[in-house]
Image: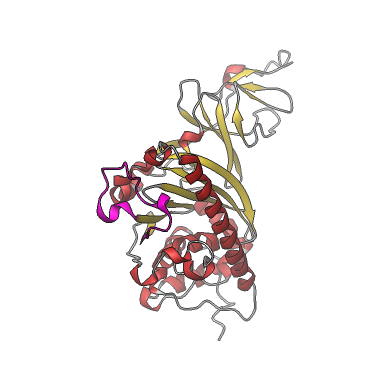
Amino acid sequence: MTRHAPDLSPLEELRANVAAPFERARAMPKSVYVSEAFAREEERHIFAREWLCAGRADALTEPGDYMTMEIAGEPVIILRDREGGLRALSNVCRHRMSTLLEGRGRTRAIVCPYHAWTYNLDGSLRGAPAMALNASFCRSDVRLPELRVVDWLGWIMVTLNPEAPDPHEALRDVEDLVGYLGMERYQEHFRQEFRWNTNWKVLAENFMESYHLPVCHSDTIGGTVNLLEMTCPEGFPAFNYHWIVKNDSLPLALAHPSNRVLSGDQRRVTWLLSIYPSLMITLTPGYFWYLSLTPDGADHVKVLYGGGMSPEWCADPDAARHLGALRQLLDEVNAEDKHCVERVFRGLKSDLSAPGALSHLERPNFEFAQWIAARIPPAPQGLGA
């Protein structure tokens, strides 16, 4: 039986979906994944309003180190200024509006590739060739607009919203939950970006539940978990989470033998944290990896993927071998996930498909749907399809 209601907007369908209690919950309606109009509303009311992750702070170590990203269509530079502070600046020249920097790197100044207007690392204009004859031009009046950026437990968090609550307050419950691991001291060792043919929410939901691990990841990590021992508690307003008690099959997932601080299950619990809207963190006593998601229309998602190790494992003489094994494993896991989430998106476009009932192991997915529904205001004429 098809449950899609063609007379309802995607938002109305979603709100009706999350109005049911979790015990009777179903997967989100198909329209919220495939509607381009709904994707635009998400960009406006979620990605332009919330804190988003640009990666790890230790990726920018020296003055002039920079990375670039887009936030709700806005090109942004994140860099270390000359005093070593983090800054987030508009990545658009104040002259003829060319974008300035690309990718990652290190620079002494920000030079426009179009007309060589040059900006200091604090965004102020240093020089503009052949502008002396323009009487209205005043160099000291020109600077790149600045955005809010903070280092939260080693994560670079950026927002366009001047009123968004600081992550140290909004995500205090994360610190209370996993602060004993000290993830701000973990070091990033790899980072890459890719683009998949699926809606960003499909990939986010895939991370949020481990129900799929034994099947989707049967060739890699599926054997390290037992669904009967998995717990999916109620989440918090700004994030959901669950955890897995790992066996000894992957030593790097456990506390290093030199770690004398952690005890009992603390030495083998893996946390899966989904920070709304789009930062997904797997945190173990030995390593971490993460995904930071940026929608690219309704049908694609840009993914920032990175990871590294805890200080004790970084200091291990055999760290390079362990890291190499971890990276190979995670690359295989990502390949499996890509296959799964792109298949889901193909199925979402089927006329005969319909959202099914959720398992108790998919509570995070239901809470995620509630969070999205609460952030997009109703439109007088609906959002369309």
Q: Is residue 357 above or below residue 46?
A: below
Say whether residue 90 is visible: yes
Q: Is residue 292 above or below residue 24?
A: above
Q: Is residue 308 magenta?
A: no
Is 307 positioned to the left or the right of 94 in the image?
Answer: left
Which quadrant would the C terminus be assigned to in this image?
bottom right
Q: Name the residue at 61% across, 67% down.
A: 345
Report the magenta stretch's main SS: loop
Q: Name the residue at 47% across, 49% down.
A: 289
Say whether residue 155 is visible: no
In the foreground, 225 or 92: 225
Q: Is residue 358 above or below residue 321?
A: below
Dividing the picture into quadrants, the one containing residue 264 is: bottom left
Q: Position of residue 262 (x, y in %)?
A: 27, 47
Is 3 positioned to the left or the right of 261 in the image?
Answer: right
Q: Name the residue at 34% across, 68% down.
A: 229
Q: Position of residue 379 (x, y in %)?
A: 53, 63
Dividing the picture into quadrants, the one containing residue 300 is: bottom right
Q: Name the residue at 69% across, 15% down.
A: 135
Q: Position of residue 261 (x, y in %)?
A: 26, 43
Q: Residue furthest bottom?
A: 1
Q: Is residue 254 magenta?
A: yes
Is 105 positioned to the left or the right of 314 in the image?
Answer: right
Which quadrant would the N terminus be assigned to in this image?
bottom right
Magenta region: 245-268
Is 126 positioned to the left or the right of 56 in the image?
Answer: right
Q: Residue furthest front?
A: 318
